[in-house]
Image (cartoon, grey):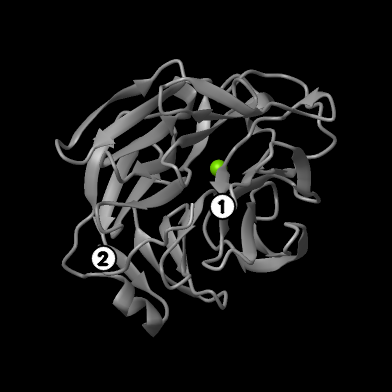
Amino acid sequence: MSLYEILDERFRPCVNKNARLDHLYTGCRWAEGPAYFPAGRYLVWSDIPNDRMLRYDEATESVGVFRSPAGYTNGHTVDRLGRLVSCEHGNRRVTRTEPDGSISVLADSFDGKPLNSPNDVVVRSDGSVWFSDPAYGIDSDYEGHRSPQEQDECFLFRIDPAGGLSVAAGGFARPNGLAFSLDERRLYVSDTGGPDHIRVFDVADDLSLSGGEVFAECTAGVFDGFRLDTEGRIWTSAADGVHVYDPDGTLLGKVLVPEVVANVCFGGPKRNRLYICGTTSLYAILLPVNGAKTF
Ligand code: MG
């Protein structure tokens, strides 16, 4: 079976037909939230139902436990100062791991009530932290702790650089993955709770959002998490692998993966290695494109 499905000629320069899909690790129940640390050349990701975070060391190609228990972490990102920012289903909070290893809470409640279960997170260059708050982590004990939802909605939240928390957008079923465009004037947010699509918002100078029209409808499974390359293309999770969208909304093609994919991130010293969290496994593939330095 071919590794790629080319749906648009513009996808050909995005893949190397000689590259292979590296199967780096298996043994997860639900691999999610990859985040790459260039300074250390390692990748951290979540194995949510097993309540642990794992680390792949690029230099030694070894995998070990990074943190366990881990508060049922889901999505992660690395901020501009190289710090790990994490969504924790179990503790219903967003945290940052500081250079000394201590953990700071960035957000754990809104309007006096606990968050649902933060799912995925991105940091803008101004230091604002944006995260989705669907209820997957409180629906059952499988990937968190079963609890009633106290927030009125599953919101998209923004933490301002000064620390204030506000609703960035509502009206989602289950907001999930998110990423900024290269100029950070647009924010892509997936919704996975019935509508299986990515919406795109315009970001104003005061960080308020407008628009929110549907950018793409998923053709296989759901868009859980995604990242952009340096041309603004979106590399997103889907049921049959990684789907790649042009900024104009065209599905260009797919990297086919033998397990359902939840999330991806670019890594390697040249940011040309796509790490793929696929259910039980961590995969990677070298690409002729490079990941954007948006977080
Ligand atoms: Mg997610």
Instruction: Please report whichever mark, 2 or 1, sits nearer to the chain's N-terminal start.
Output: 2
Which residue is situated farthest in the front direction here?
162
Q: Are marks 2 and 1 in contact (CB under 8 Å)?
A: no
Q: Which residue is mark 1?
A: 222
Horizontal arrangement in the rendering, residue 57 relative to residue 248 (left or right): left
- Location of residue 32 (image quadrant): top left
Q: Position of residue 188 (x, y in %)?
A: 61, 60
Q: Position of residue 249 (x, y in %)?
A: 57, 74
Report the quarter where the N terminus lies. bottom left
Q: Amino acid at mark 2?
A: Ser
- Location of residue 142 (image quadrant): top right
Q: Amino acid at mark 1?
A: Val
Give the structural element (helix, strand or loop) at label 2: loop
Q: Which residue appears at 27% of the width and 38% of the height?
A: 40
Give the structural element (helix, strand or loop) at label 1: loop
Can residue 261 be seen here? no
Can residue 188 be seen here? yes
Q: Nearer the viewer, residue 169 or 139?
A: 169
Q: Which mark is residue 2?
A: 2
Position of residue 20 relative to residue 145, above or below, is below
Q: Which residue appears at 49% of the width and 54% of the height?
A: 226
